[in-house]
Image (cartoon, coloured by chain):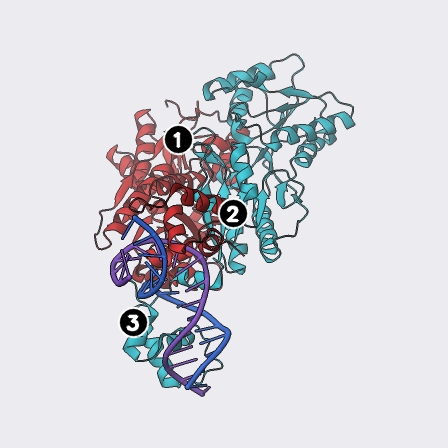
Chain colours: A red, B cyan, C purple, D blue
Amino acid sequence: MAVTLKQIADVVGVHVSVVSRVLNDKDGEFDYTEKRKKAIRETARKLGYVPNISARSVKSGAFGCVALLVSSHGERSYLPNRLLVSMHKELEKNEKHLLLTKLPDATSEDYSRTPTVLKTLMADGLILDYTHHVSPEIISRIEKFILPKVWINTKRETDCVYPDNLKAGMEATNKLIELGHKRIAYITDVSYQTSKFGEHYSISDRYEGYARAMKKAGLKPMKFDGEGKIIGKNQQEKYFTEILSLKNRPTAIVLYWSSLVPAILSSARKIGIKIPDELSIITVSGCTAQNDGLCADAMIEPEIEMGKESVKMLIEKIKKPDKQIKSLLLNFSYFETGTVKKC
Amino acid sequence: MAVTLKQIADVVGVHVSVVSRVLNDKDGEFDYTEKRKKAIRETARKLGYVPNISARSVKSGAFGCVALLVSSHGERSYLPNRLLVSMHKELEKNEKHLLLTKLPDATSEDYSRTPTVLKTLMADGLILDYTHHVSPEIISRIEKFILPKVWINTKRETDCVYPDNLKAGMEATNKLIELGHKRIAYITDVSYQTSKFGEHYSISDRYEGYARAMKKAGLKPMKFDGEGKIIGKNQQEKYFTEILSLKNRPTAIVLYWSSLVPAILSSARKIGIKIPDELSIITVSGCTAQNDGLCADAMIEPEIEMGKESVKMLIEKIKKPDKQIKSLLLNFSYFETGTVKKC
DNA sequence: CTGAAAGCGCTTACAG
DNA sequence: CTGAAAGCGCTTACAG
C-alpha cells in the first residue's frame, strides 16, 4: 500500500541506497548528479513517499519516542493539559514523540495486568506519572523494566520530579498567619475517595506543611476531614455550614483541593459570612483552573515545570542509563482572586 | 543492549524461529516438546527479553498506534483529561497506542512547519483535534496525508465527531426562558484572544443557538462582546459591573466559557445582586471543571463521548480507508450548582 | 513434523 | 567515486 524506497528506485532506475541517501540528504560524500537527485526527489513527491519509521528504528535501535504512563482512577487521572503541552515542547527539542498510556486502574478487575509498553520495546524511556491507585505488583514490574525512567508527581529520592506539597501547605498557611489569622482551618478533600493502595503523598505533605506553620506560630491546628468519610455533592454545603457555625469558627481556610470551593462559597453566602471580609480562603488547584473559572485564591501546581524538567531528566538518563539523578522539587505559584484578607 | 530472539536461541540451542513461535504462542501446529518450550520461556525471562515492536511492525506493516494531533495556542490547547482517558480506553480495546503531537502554533514563527507525524509513517491513523490557530497550509497538508483520519471538535460534513454547540446554546437559553427570564444576556469570552486563522466554530454556533432560542420566544438578543477587545483579568470585574448596572440589566446570563465566572460573581457581590435570586447564570465548561471548583451551572462538553466515538470512527476507517463516514454530533450535559432560578 | 531461509523497509559499511 | 550487499529484529511461508 504505502510507497517504498524500492518503488522510487525502480521508477528512477537506480538502487534503493541512492534513493535513501538523496532523500535523507546524506549525499554529502557522494557525487550524484543534480539531475538524478532531482528525479529522485520529484518521484518521491509524486508517488507520495513517506518513510516508514519502524524500519528506521530497527536499524538505529532507537524509537524516537518517550512513553508517559499515567495512573488513574476511573475517568480521573493526573493528566493536566499544561503538563502534557510542556512535556511535548521539551520532547520536540529532542526530536522525540510522546506515547500516552494509562496504567491499569485500582478500581478495575485487572489491576495487575501489565500494560503493553512494559511488555514491549517501543520507547526510549518512560515517564511515570504516578499518583496512587496503582497496584504494588505493577510498581515493582515498572521498577524492574529495562528502560530508563523518571517519576513525576510522587516522592522518591532519585530520578523523580515532584511538586513541593509540604512547602505549598506551609506557604498558604503562613500567608494567612501574616495577615493576622489565628483560627485557620485545614480542610481535606472529602469529595474524593482514597485508594486501596494508599494515599498520594500530597495528602499528608500538604497537611504537614500546614501543621508545621501553625506550630511555629504557636497556633493550634484545626483539621476537618469529615472523619474520613466521603461527602457527596449535595451534602457538602451542609458540612461547611456546620463548620462555619461553630462557636469558634475558623476565620480562614486552607483547602486541599478546589473541588469544594463552590460548596464553601454558597454555604458562606447563606449563613451571611462575607468573603473575604469575614472568611479568607486559599485552596490548591491545577493550572487550568485559572482559566476555567476558579473562584478562590490558590496555590497552583507547577505543571509546566514538571513537564519540562521530567523530560530533561529523562533525556539525560537515556544518554547515561546507569546514572542516578537526585530528585527535583518544584514550587507552587500563587493565584489571586481576592478571597484573602487581613483578619 | 536489549536482548534479542537470537540470544535466547543461542542459549537454548535452537533456531530463532522456534523461539519466536513459542514466545508468541504460535506453536499450535508445531509439536515442540514441553521441555524445550519451558527452556525457551525461562531463558527469555531470565535474560529479560522484551520484543522489539519496530521489527514486528516492519513485517506486519501496521504500527498498532493512533496519533492525536492537537492544535494549540501557547500553553493552551484543547486536550482535556477526560477526552484523553476515554480515547485511551477505546484504543486499548483495539490494541492500539496513543501518540500525542501538538500542531505548530499560530503564535509561533514556524507555524507552517510540518510535524513529524505528517512526514513519517508511524501510526495507523490520525485523530485531528482541531480547534483553530492552525495555518491553512498545515490543514491542507493534513488533508492530503495518506493515513485514515478523523477530526474532532470542528465542524465537517464527514469523518468528524464534534459537540453540538448550537444546541448547547439553545438549551441553556431555553432553560432560562422557561423559568420566565426575558432579559437574557449572552456574554462572549472577552478574556481570550482570537486567532489570526479565524475563530472556532463554537463561538458563532453557541451564539447562534442562543439567538435562535431568543427569537423563537419573541425576545430580543442582548450580546456583550467587549467590542471585540480582550479584557484583562483586573478589568473584568469592572466590565461586569457596568453590564449589571445598566438600567435594564439582564436577569440572566449565558456565558461562552467559565473563565469569567469569578469576575461575574465578585462583581454581583459588590453591587449587591444576589445569585441566583436576582441573577441566573449558565456557562459552558469542560468535564474537569466539575471537580475543580466551578461555581456556576454549566453546559458540560461531551469530552468522554467525543474521545470514544472518534476512536470508533477511526478504527472503522482504518479497516475501510476509502469509506466516508457521516459526522457525529454530540450533546452537552448539564451541571447544576444552584446559580439558576425562576425570574 | 521441524528447521533454515526469505523478506518486511530501511541505512550504511564495504567492495569494486 | 559509485553500487551492490549485509544487516537491524522479527515473523512466516516454504523446503526438507
Q: Which numbered disc, 2 or 1, marks the residue that appears first in the sequence?
A: 2
What residue is disc 2 on?
A48
Q: Which chain carries label 2?
A: A
Amino acid marked by disc 3: Gln
**Could you tell me which quadrant the N terminus of chain B lies in?**
bottom left
Crowd around label 3: few <14 · some 14–19 · many ≥20 (10 Å): some
What residue is disc 1 on?
A252
Label 2–label 3 contact, CB within 8 A: no
Q: Distance between the residues labelled 2 and 3?
A: 39 Å
Q: Distance between the residues labelled 1 and 3?
A: 65 Å
Q: For this rendering, which residue is in front, A320 or A126? A: A320
Crowd around label 1: few <14 · some 14–19 · many ≥20 (10 Å): many
Which mark, residue B315?
A: none
Q: Mark 1 lies on which chain?
A: A
Label 2 in the same subunit as label 1 = yes
Amino acid marked by disc 1: Ala
Q: In this view, does A112 lie above or below B234?
A: below
- Residue positioned 72% across, 30% down in the render: B179
Q: Which of marks 2 and 3 is in front?
A: 2
The spot of residue A334 in percent (x, y) is 36, 30
Q: Is residue A68 visible?
A: no
Numbered disc 2: secondary structure: loop
Q: How far apart are marks 2 and 1 (CA)?
A: 64 Å
What residue is disc 3 on?
B7
The spot of residue B267 in percent (x, y) is 53, 20
Q: Which chain carries label 3?
A: B
Q: For this rendering, which residue is in front, B323 or A67? A: B323
Numbered disc 3: secondary structure: helix
- Residue positioned 58% across, 28% down in the render: B199
Q: Can residue A264 be seen in this view?
A: yes
**Could you tell me which quadrant the C terminus of chain B lies in?**
top right
